[in-house]
Image (cartoon, grey):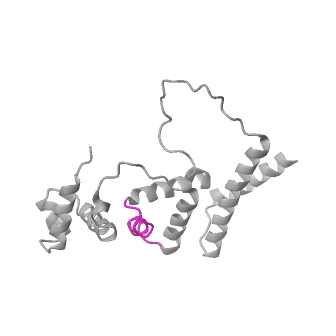
């Protein structure tokens, strides 16, 4: 269960918009521990209306390219995660922070990893898994490397220093591709 329901959030936001007090005063009045929570609700309400405050029951998935675009915008403009999330139509800035952490730690591959635990299905699938051919595996790897390369080129064009971890990884993976092709 969510800590705050939709009606409560809407009441607090409406109180702020009606001029009943500032963030800190309303946080005390409505017993919300941090004024930043109310600030976030107001920003979301202004950007998305009532729907932005509602709890999302269906999880939305984002493509690797979308994640890279959002992170590129964040890095190039140095805006807050909240501002970038609003710009890209997202109501949860924590997603961006998680993507940023995954990208800095694992590179582009970190953005394409599936989230969460694998399902614990009791039924075993009778369908044999399709094993990719060596050619298909290499095509997937090439596509991933192209996306990473394009992103690194964007960073260079913007004059942003590329972390040494990514430079090493990029050279190592290209050497591995050359070895595999020989």
Q: Nearer the viewer, residue 179 or 17?
A: 17
Point out residue 130 in the picture as x, y percentages from the top left corner. Answer: 69, 35
* Image position of 81 with respect to 173: above or below: below
Specify the segment rendered in magenta: 78-91
Q: Is 149 in the magenta?
A: no
* Image position of 152 with respect to 1: above or below: below
Q: Nearer the viewer, residue 125 or 71?
A: 125
The residue lying at 49 percent from left, 44 percent from top is: 115
Which residue is most to the front? 127
* Image position of 2 with respect to 168: above or below: above
Question: How many labels sit on residues?
Answer: 0
The residue lying at 22 percent from left, 52 percent from top is: 5
* Image position of 132 with respect to 11: above or below: above
Point out residue 152 in the picture as x, y percentages from the top left corner. Answer: 65, 65
Point out residue 135 in the picture as x, y percentages from the top left corner. Answer: 79, 45
Which residue is most to the right? 182
Residue 22 is left or right of residue 80, and the answer is left
The image quarter containing residue 53 is bottom left
Name the quarter where the N terminus is drawn.
top left
Residue 57 is left or right of residue 102, and the answer is left
The residue lying at 58 percent from left, 50 percent from top is: 112
The image quarter containing residue 156 is bottom right
Q: Nearer the viewer, residue 47 or 75?
A: 47
Residue 43 is left or right of residue 94, and the answer is left
Q: Is 81 in the magenta?
A: yes
């Amino acid at each position: 269960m969510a800590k705050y329901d939709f009606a409560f959030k809407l009441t607090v936001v409406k109180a702020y918009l009606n001029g009943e007090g500032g963030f800190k005063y309303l946080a005390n009045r409505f017993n919300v521990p941090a004024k930043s929570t109310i600030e976030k609700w107001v920003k979301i309400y202004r950007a998305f209306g009532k729907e932005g405050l509602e709890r999302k029951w269906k999880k939305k998935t984002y493509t690797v390219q979308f994640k890279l675009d959002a992170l590129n915008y964040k890095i190039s403009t140095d805006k807050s995660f909240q501002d970038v999330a609003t710009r890209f139509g997202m109501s949860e800035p924590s997603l961006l922070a998680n993507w940023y952490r995954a990208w800095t730690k694992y590179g582009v591959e970190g953005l394409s990893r599936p989230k969460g635990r694998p399902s614990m299905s009791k039924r075993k699938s009778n369908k044999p898994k399709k094993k990719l051919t060596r050619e298909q595996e290499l095509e997937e790897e090439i596509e991933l490397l192209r996306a990473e390369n394009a992103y690194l080129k964007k960073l260079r064009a913007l004059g942003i220093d590329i972390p040494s971890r990514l430079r090493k990884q990029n050279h190592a993976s290209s050497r591995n591709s050359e070895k595999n092709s020989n």
